[in-house]
Amino acid sequence: MFFQQMSIAAAGAFCRRLGVGLRAGANLLRLLEAETKYGSPRQKAALRALLEEIQSGFAINEAMQRQKDFFPRLMIAMTKVGESTGKLERTFLTLAAHYENQVKLRRQFLSSIAWPMIQLTLALFIVSIVIYLMGILTPAGGGQMTDMLGFGLRGGSGVMIFWLYVLCVAAMIGAAIYGFRKNLGGVQNLIPVFYMIPKFGEAIQTITLARFTRILSIGLGAGLDPIRSIKLALASTDSEYYRSGSKTVEVAIQEQGETMSGALRATDLFPPQFLHLVEVSEMSGTESESIEHIADEYEARAAMAMRVISGIATGVVWFCVAAGLVFLILRIAMTYVNGINSALEGLR
């Protein structure tokens, strides 16, 4: 069966309810049965399938794996760790905190760019109205209205063509984002180049490291060995650029006897400041707790980094709106100036 993957907001709420219920001593099957009554139709269907798999004898991790099109990969991997270590309720609660923080960062970004996007939409609608009016209005002397915008578009058909152009641009931006996320053509190898962009690159790297360290702390805290913890954390970045370091980490620890910081350094994926913090955490002798402190620090930095990215995105949208309005004003002004000049020449 194939389902649309659970959103991070739904995943956070789901893990929170299961974690609280298990900690209170509730039966897992009864908790899952209650979950099948809430959520979207697809979520209900996926959870019913999960419940049926467990009732037929599968462990919850195995049942989730059979429904991997719906459950996030991180949840599946950590559920397996929680089951094997007997810390399933703690694992679910930790996952809930992680997903809830991701939702918080996403909402922070969306709320910050909401007003600029509204302004951009209003500007596009104003242009559409002008195009439409130029098609239905006629000057006193007859004929067509002067093309004040210079687009060569008039009336309803002109509005449709204009919005087709807008949708094409939006589709190109969406395709570029999709291609980057799916690493089409190995485009994620350019990530170090993005990191070199002032402010923006540093912010992106900080957010990625925050996710990496949080998953690393979850894995170590659940009793997972360093190799599997690092591999899980690398996979959680959703980036082939970082996943490429998995084999290097395994070789460095198993064959070369490197510490966790040494293995991460061997990948050439992480900045020196981050590696220094990991090295210091290893010296303390309590890797799990120390990495958790690093995760807390980087999540605080990620919140500030998200504000930086939001500010950059807001500035780009405002610049586009302002540039478009200035262009249109100048275009309209030039149209009238040319008309006046033509009239004056006719009087000579």
Image: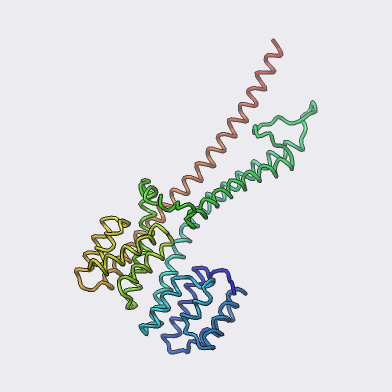
Quadrant of the image occupied by residue 56 = bottom right
Which quadrant holds residue 249? bottom left
Residue 215 placement (x, y as % from top left): 37, 69
Residue lying at 46% horizontally and 80% vertically, measured from the top left: 61
Q: Residue at x 68, y 33 (%)?
A: 152
Of the 4 image quadrants, the one containing the C terminus is top right
Relative depth, front residue between 190 and 280: 190
- Residue at the image point whose x is 65% and y is 34% from the top: 151
Furthest-left residue in this view: 283
Vertical relation: 208 (above or below) 231: above
Q: Position of residue 287 (x, y in %)?
A: 26, 71
Asked whether, in this view, residue 174 is left or right of residue 292, the answer is right
In the picture, measured across the screen, residue 218 lies left or right of residue 112, that is left
Q: How are the residues colored?
A: rainbow
Q: Residue 329, how many percent across, how many down?
A: 59, 33
Residue at the (52%, 72%) spot, across then down = 10
Q: Residue furthest right?
A: 142
Quadrant for residue 336, please give it: top right
